[in-house]
Image (cartoon, rainbow, N blue to C red):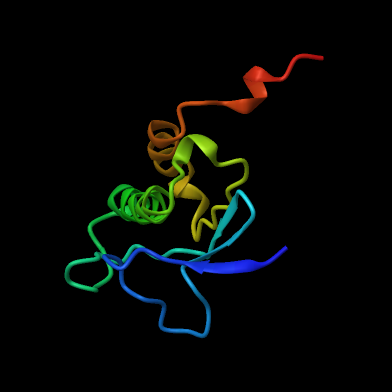
Amino acid sequence: MIFKKVENKKLPMPKGCYSQAVQMGNLIFTSDQLPVDPISGKFVYDGIEKQVIKVLENIKAILEDNGSSLNHVIKATIFISNIKHWDAVNKVYSDYFKIHYRQLVQL
């Protein structure tokens, strides 16, 4: 299979030597995202909830700009710098990911 670089031109381009995402067949693999505002290009520092929202909005934009959506995400990894933020991160995360695949699995 051939890998294709995919991106959303409205979001800041990565500063490092990686792309926003790559596509292989019907799968899109997004790179890690930081809470960067696409308009100002600056980090969001207004609290953990707003940071998580910005990260998920950026991922959502990449996916939707390339014909997918958060409803098709099958794996996500979140790095939390302080476990005290777990409840806040989980609350925002659950607002964005309405489909819980573990509930769909029948044994």
Which of the two residues, 10 or 39, is positioned nearer the viewer here? 10
Vertical order, 39 against 88 (above or below): below
Quadrant (top left/top right/bottom left/bottom right) for the N terminus: bottom right
Give the residue drawn at x 53%, y 38%: 72
Please state the horizontal and vertical placement of residue 70, each as a whole percent of the image. Answer: 46, 40
- In this rendering, would 8 be left or right of 37? right
Relative to 84, is 46 above or below? below
User: Horizontally, is 58 left or right of 2 in the view?
Assistant: left
Q: Is residue 38 above or below residue 66?
A: below
Q: Position of residue 73 (x, y in %)?
A: 55, 42
Q: Position of residue 6 (x, y in %)?
A: 47, 65
Q: Residue furthest top?
A: 106
Which residue is rendered at x = 43% and y = 44% of the image?
Answer: 89
Number of numbered discs visible in the structure rendering:
0
Q: Nearer the viewer, residue 93 or 49?
A: 93
Residue 65 versus residue 43 in the image, above or below: above
User: Residue, x 44% and y 63% (percent of image)?
Assistant: 33
Quarter of the rendering occupied by the C terminus: top right
Dividing the picture into quadrants, the one containing residue 41 is: bottom left
Extreme right residue here? 107
Q: Which residue is pictured at 46% across the width and 44% down the height?
A: 68
Please state the horizontal and vertical placement of residue 44, each as a whole percent of the image: 26, 63
